[in-house]
Image (tube, coloured by chain):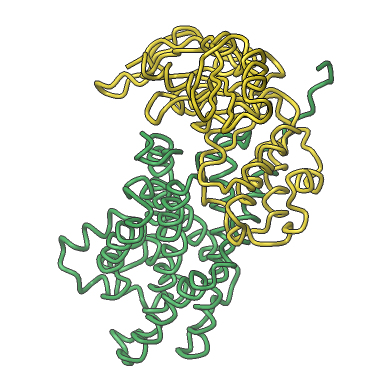
Amino acid sequence: MTTVAAPMPSTLSIGLSRAAYELKVFFREKDQVVFTFAFPIVFLVLLGSIFAGTMEGVSVSQLYTAGLIGAGVLSVSMQNLGITIAIEREQGMLKRLSGTPMPRTAYFLGKILSVLVIGVVEVALLLAVGVTMYDLRLPSDAAGWLTFAWVFVLGLTAGCLLGIALSSLARSDKSASAVITLPFIVLQFVSGVYIPFNQLPDWLATVGYVFPLSWMCQGFRSVFLGEAGAVLERSGGYELDRVALVLGLWIIGGLVLCLTTFRWKSRREG
Amino acid sequence: MSVRGLTKRYGQVEAVRGIDLEIRAGETFAILGPNGAGKSTTVEILEGHRGRDGGEVRVLGVDPRRPTRRWRARIGIVPQEAQDVAEVTVREAVRHFAGFYPDPLDPDEVIEQAGLTESADRRVSRLSGGQRRRLDVALAVVGRPELLFLDEPTTGFDPEARRRFWDLIKRLPGTKVLTTHYLEEAEVLADRVAVIAKGRVVGEGDPATLGGRAQAKTLVRWADGEVRTDSPTATVAELTARYGGDIPGLTVTRPTLEDTYLRLIEEAV
């Protein structure tokens, strides 16, 4: 063998190829597609119909739209990745990939990019429901959309990293769904998705403040409810600098957690 | 590839207790042994999937404890039975994996070589067990590896699927390292075999001469008797004369690889 070694394909190109592959697989699992997208929409329609009134001048259904966009983003990122990665680990996909020259970063890049696409679809559906059924006002200026975009991207990235880290908790592919779903539901209750933040007992709200979902939801409320909704915040106003700070910290912490705890082999293989 | 004094412990259990192997470029080397003998552990260490507790290991000149992308591109791994790649087609899967390598083969040619051309656009989840394993081989060889690992590749196959699989493996170029507990498989595919029992190599060599098999006496059996002899042809000629034609119930057998293998395993216990 005297041939000059061909260059290795770049991490970015493999990451993009992984993302395309992940999306193909995701959209072919019809059940998963329907239930992933239906979850926040069904809740929005349910809650929006049950609580039709206003709270301190703010439409409750619009409040729920903002909250469920946050929950939807967390669902496609944390819940979806936490479960699918646990399954991939048990079925040997991760081990197979780690035996190829695919850079490990490309795997995570592919996951996050594919979740980004799924998240955009999810949010677009929720906004469509909010606008048509509950007179949700979309941001009228670039600044509003910009806030929306960075809250979305930071929240989704933090959720992805959290999901990747949580996937290692499940002992088998069969338990993965149960292991991931409980923390996901609890997070929604302590983060102001279903129960407005100012009605939570202090200690629960404090728990909620620790996790990214409450901050992501606050960011979305600032975009969709505007100044009229600020009275509902515990601090009496939006704290977007803190939203960015906490989501950023979760991204860094999540990355460290992933790098230190991620396993490419299933537990039974040691 | 060379392995010297390889050891691996899981808690109190010594899975591998000082294994030495020398595998030459271009040969097909089979590692035989009962379940739990340390075959898979050894191969996983060679593949860079598992660390070791002691010993020197070089695979293609690299210590597999620290695998690099370049090194990974030079080896191919056919994992033990897997269900992972499912809702993509054969062609999509092979193309996707080809993209990981610097100088891959043409995916369609690999599919053809694996005998999957007719199933190329079928979902992997709908393939038969034998087709599924041939896809695993296609995914492992699409990067043009110099060295291919196959870990118990034909477990659960029917005889026809097994023969087709062997034909495929025989046609592949490069060095191949195979673990199996099917002795026939080792005999058909391997240039040399090592028998591992209780974490040690208990026999090594050409499958035809392993454990003194070639020197062992041949068993000649017929309706009224049997004899172990070094010159079976003479015995048969003598019997032909005695019966004046056909010898009733005649069989002539050399010790099979299985006989030799079982003796080696028993001696290790």
Question: x, y (%) of residue B13?
Answer: 28, 22
Residue under the point 56% across and 21% down = B220
Q: Is residue B118 left or right of residue A268?
A: right
Q: Quadrant of the C terminus of chain B?
A: top left
Residue under the point 45% across and 51% down = A85
* Camera-nearest residue between A248 and A78: A78
Q: Is residue B154 left or right of residue A45?
A: right
Q: Which color is chain A depicted in? A: green
Q: Quadrant of the N terminus of chain B?
A: top right
* Camera-nearest residue between B58 and B260: B260
Q: Would you say residue B1 is visible in this rendering?
A: no
Q: Is residue B235 left or right of residue A263?
A: right
- Extreme right residue here? A3
Question: x, y (%) of residue A11?
Answer: 65, 38
Question: x, y (%) of residue A184?
Answer: 32, 62
Q: Would you say residue B230 is visible in this rendering?
A: yes
Q: Is residue B87 above or below residue B154?
A: below
Among the 4 quarters of the image, the one containing residue A128 = bottom right
Question: x, y (%) of residue B180?
Answer: 52, 31
Q: Which color is chain B depicted in? A: yellow
Residue under the point 69% across and 54% down = B90
